[in-house]
Image (cartoon, grey):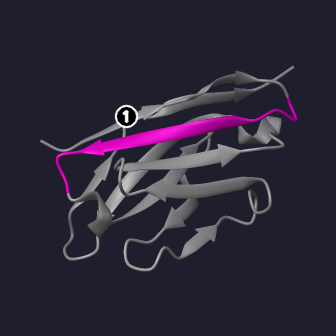
């Protein structure tokens, strides 16, 4: 059974930092591209960052470039999202997603709340 277990959300003041983690089990982690999405209040879910399975290519949404960093540790089957200089607009439920490089399989984490507020 595939599981993506997220941790690290919470309440932070504007300008602060948080690190999200997403630990995978039940799949061959190194063969999955990993992404972080978020869904803010009253908004559609949007892609935040992606790190590919094959060559580690990274892409970011324009709104988080220079502030967020996605990384993966294939020895721990975990993907991270380091979020710095957080803004109130970053408030959302954050989800990790795994997409297989070889087929159409994809899986979602359970979501974790990030609230940026003073």
Q: Looking at the image, is 43 positioned above or below residue 116? A: below
Q: Name the residue under label 1.
A: 110
Position of the N terminus by quadrant: top left
Position of the C terminus by quadrant: top right
Q: Is residue 26 visible?
A: yes
Q: Please name the residue shown 35% across and 53% down the image.
A: 75
Q: Where is residue 46 in the image (x, y as percent from the top left)?
A: 56, 55
Q: Where is residue 25 in the image (x, y as percent from the top left)?
A: 23, 43
Q: Which region shows up in magenta?
A: 14-27
Q: Please name the residue shown 28% across and 58% down the image.
A: 29
Going by the image, does 90 lie left or right of 74? right
Q: Position of residue 96 (x, y in %)?
A: 44, 47
Membership of 97 in magenta stretch:
no
Q: Please name the residue shown 63% across and 30% down the image.
A: 114
Q: Looking at the image, is 117 positioned above or below residue 50? A: above
Q: Looking at the image, is 74 positioned above or below residue 60? A: above
Residue at the left extreme of this rendering: 1
Q: Position of residue 66 (x, y in %)?
A: 80, 61
Membership of 21 in magenta stretch:
yes
Going by the image, does 29 lie left or right of 63? left
Q: Can residue 41 be seen in this view?
A: no
How busy is the neighbourhood of tag 1: few (under 14 within 10 Å), some, or many (20 plus)?
some
């Amino acid at each position: 059974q595939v599981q993506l277990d997220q941790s690290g959300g919470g309440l932070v003041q504007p300008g602060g930092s948080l690190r999200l983690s997403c630990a995978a089990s039940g799949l061959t982690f190194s063969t999955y591209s990993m992404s972080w999405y978020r869904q803010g209040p009253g908004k559609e879910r949007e892609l935040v960052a992606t790190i590919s399975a094959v060559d580690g290519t990274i892409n970011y949404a324009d709104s988080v470039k220079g502030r967020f960093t996605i990384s993966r540790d294939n020895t721990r089957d975990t993907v991270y999202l380091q979020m710095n200089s957080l803004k109130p607009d970053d408030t959302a439920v954050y989800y990790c997603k795994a997409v297989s490089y070889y087929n159409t399989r994809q899986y979602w984490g359970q979501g974790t709340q990030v609230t940026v507020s003073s």
